Amino acid sequence: MGHARDRKGRALRILVTGASGLIGSAICARLIADGHAVVGAGRPGGSPLPQGLAGEVLVDMARQARAEDWAPHLKDIDAVVNCAGLLQAGAAGSPSALHIAGVDALFAACEAAGIRRVVQISALGVSDDSPTEFTKSKYVGDAALTERDLDWVILRPSVVLGRQAYGGSALIRGLAALPVFPIISESAPLQVVALDDVVDTVAFFVKPEAPSHLTLELAGPERLSFEEIVAAYRRWFRWPPAKTIWLPDAIGRAMFRLGDLAGALGWRPPVRSTARKELLRGSVGDPGPWTKATGIAPRSLKQMLDTTPPSVQERWFAKLFFLKPLILIVFAVFWLVSGLIALGPGYREGVLIMLAAGTGAWAVPIVIGGAFADIVLGLAMLYRPTAKPTLIAAFVLCILYLVFGTYLAPGMWATPVGVFPKVVPIMALNLVIFAMLDDR
C-alpha cells in the first residue's frame, strides 16, 4: 500500500481515538510509519498511548457528549479514525454512552470543523436487534454517522487477531496453553481477521481520494469453530494437541458470571456475559466487497500465524494467562485469612508473642491493628483501582514487619515453623503479581 497522503502528496494529520487499544495502537504505528502526524486519543487513567505521536488527547468519550468539547482537539486535523469501543458496561462507562452519544459528538465536531474523512471501526454483525448492548449500540452509532455530511467509511471487523494480545486474543492464547481444553458447546463459527489486514484497510481509506460512503465487512476467508482457533494457536506454539473436555452449560454460564463479578470490581476479563452472547451469535460475513474495494485479500489464520513465529515471551504469556488471576486471588485470600485468624483462633497466641517481645500494653492494639490491616489489604487487592497501591503497601508492610520483628524478637528467625523466613517468598510473590498487573 502507498502512503496515505493527500492529492498534493502532503502527509496528513490524523486523529485516532481508542489509540491505546489493540486495533487503535496498531493503526497509530502504521500511520506514523507512513509518515503521518498522528494524534492519539485515550481515556484518562487508561492504558498508555503509543510512542511517536504528534499529540495526545485524554478524553473520556463515554462521558463527553458535546461536540464543542472536541473543537480544540480537531485543530489542523485532516482525518479521523475512531477505534474507541467498549464491550460491556463497567467502570469505564457503558457501551451505549460511548458508541452513540460520545462518538456522535466527535462526528458532529468533525462536520463543524470541515473534516471530511472519517473512518469508523465498528463490529461485524451489528443490528438493531442484536443480543448485546455492544453490537446494538455500535449499529445505532453507525447509522448516525451515515446521516452526517462526511466522507465516511464504516469498517466492521470480525474477531481481530494479531501479534499483540489483549481481550479475546489473549484468552485464546491462554486456552491454547492448557493441556485440557474446555469446550463450551454453544459457540458458533467465527471468521477471524488478521490485525494487519485491518490496519492496511484503514491506511487505504484515510486517503482523501479513497472511496467513501461504504460499509464493509472485514471477515477472514474461512469459518472456524472456537475450538479450531485455539487448536491452531496450540500448533503455533509447537505444543502437542490438547485433550478436550465438554463443559456443562451451567458451568460455562457460571464462569461468565464470575467474569461479570470481576468486571464489577474494576477488572476487564475477556470472559463476561457479553462475550458469551457474542460467541453464541458467532461472527461471519462476506469479505468479497472488502477485497473488491481495496484489493486486500484477507489472510487465513494459518497464514497469519506462519508469518509471526512465537517467541519465548509468547509462550510465557500464554502459560501465565490463567495463573495471573489465580495467584492474585490466592494472595488476596492469604492476607484476608491471616487477618481473620489473628482476630479469631490465633488472637491469644499473637498477644502472648507480642508480650514476650516486650511490647507491654501495646500488645493487644498491635495484634488487632495488624489483623485489620491484613483484612483491608486482602479486600483491596481484589478491587482493580486499588490493587496496585495495595500491593505496594503490602510489600512495605512486610519490610516493616521484618525490621521491627527482628528488633523485638530476633529469635523468630530460628523458630521451627520459620515465621520470619516465610515472609521473604511472600514478598517475592508480591513482586511477581505487581509485575503482571497491567492488562495492556
Image (cartoon, rainbow, N blue to C red):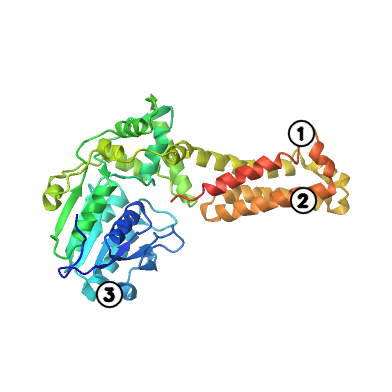
91 to 149, vertically: above or below: above
Q: Mark 2 points at which residue?
A: 403
* Image location of residue 48, percent across then percent down: 43, 59
Instruction: Identify residue type, mark 2.
Output: Val
Determine whether, in the image, residue 131 is placed left or right of residue 347.
left
Looking at marks 3 and 1 on the same chain, the residue that comes earlier in the sequence is marked by: 3
Q: Residue at x 23, y 60 (%)?
A: 119
Which of the two labelled residues, at mark 3 and mark 2, occupies the earlier sequence position?
Answer: 3
| Kind of residue sitting beneath label 3 | Asp
The residue where tag 3 is placed is: 76
- Which quadrant is the N terminus positioned in? bottom left
Rendered residue at 23%/38% (across/down): 300
**Of the numbered discs in the image, which one, if any, rests on residue 417?**
1
Tell which residue pokes out farthest to the left in this image.
292
Instruction: State the CA–CA distance, disc 3 to disc 1.
Output: 68 Å
Mark 2 crowd level (few <14, some 14–19, many ≥20, 10 Å Cα): few
Residue 270 coordinates in the image, percent (x, y): 40, 44
